[in-house]
Image (tube, rainbow, N blue to C red):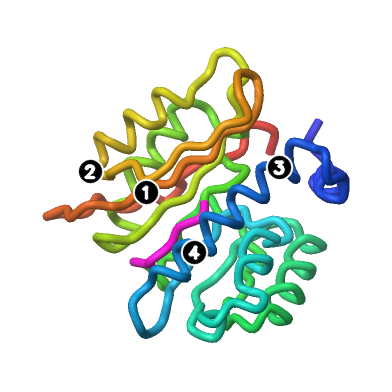
Amino acid sequence: MARDWVEWHRSYTDPNSELSQRLAVVTAAVEAVLSGAPHGPISVLSLCAGEARDLSLAAAGHPRAADVRGCAVELNAGLASIAADSLRASGTAITVRCADAGRPIHWGDVVPVDLLLLAGIFGNLTDAHVRRTIEAVPAIVRPGGTVIWTRHRREPDLTPSIRDWFDDAGCTPVGFTSGGANSFAVGVERVGATTVPPALPEQLFRFVDA
């Protein structure tokens, strides 16, 4: 049975939940990217964005909020509507597309970007699709840009492999924060230069319960 993603998001209302703790780490990482970005537009792509709390919280009141643009992609219409309202209120120019984020046709026109958010995705994919998504990063993020990703650490803990796959894709680790074994992990990677970015497949990933 497919997960009820609207119900799943209710855990964010509990400040003691792992989702809330993870959100705080991701939000701080996004804020750091915004604060360190050079003058000019800051392009962002958030895949499976949900309510886009990470982006909207990081941008709200931030002096660079008006420079933030790009798109957030979310398949659930209810969550996409909430994301659009929140991002608009935060002062960004990010648009929300209600579409399958696993298909690059829905967001390929905005890449390469300065910041790619892969929060809440890797725990819902097969290992092969996690790796394929990471291998595609050089085609999605411009050199010097940032990727923020999350993954649970329940056994078997895939985060060591994920970090190796980012290394193989030419990325440099910037940060790794975890609540410990069986908890959440948040990684931050800087994308290196690549001569020939890989071609994006028609279907980059697919949720295992979708």
Q: CA distance from mark 3 to mark 4?
A: 22 Å
| Residue 102 horizontal/vertical position (percent) | 53, 50
Q: CA distance from mark 2 to mark 4?
A: 19 Å
- Helix, strand or loop at label 1? It is loop
Residue underneath mark 2: 170
Crowd class of label 3 (few under 14; some 14 to 19; many from 20; radius 10 Å): some
Q: Residue furthest left?
A: 195
Q: Nearer the viewer, mark 3 or mark 4?
A: 3
* Mark positioned earlier in the residue sequence (4 or 1): 4
Residue 142 vs 169, above or below: the answer is: below
Q: Which residues are magenta?
A: 112-117
| Residue 47 horizontal/vertical position (percent) | 55, 55
Residue underneath mark 3: 21
Checking the image for residue 45, the label placed there is 4
Relative to 203, 146 lies left or right = left
Which residue is depicted at the point 42% across and 52% down?
147
Crowd class of label 1 (few under 14; some 14 to 19; many from 20; radius 10 Å): some
Q: Nearer the viewer, mark 2 or mark 3?
A: 3
Foreground residue, 187 or 47?
187
Please state, as top left, top right, bottom left or bottom right, where the N terminus lies in the image: top right
Residue 116 vs 209, above or below: the answer is: below
Task: Please state which amino acid type lies under the numbered disc 3.
Answer: Gln
| Residue 133 horizontal/vertical position (percent) | 41, 42
* Mark positioned earlier in the residue sequence (1 or 3): 3
Foreground residue, 107 or 63?
63
Residue underneath mark 1: 201
Q: CA distance from mark 1 to mark 3?
A: 33 Å
Q: Nearer the viewer, mark 4 or mark 1?
A: 4
Crowd class of label 4 (few under 14; some 14 to 19; many from 20; radius 10 Å): many
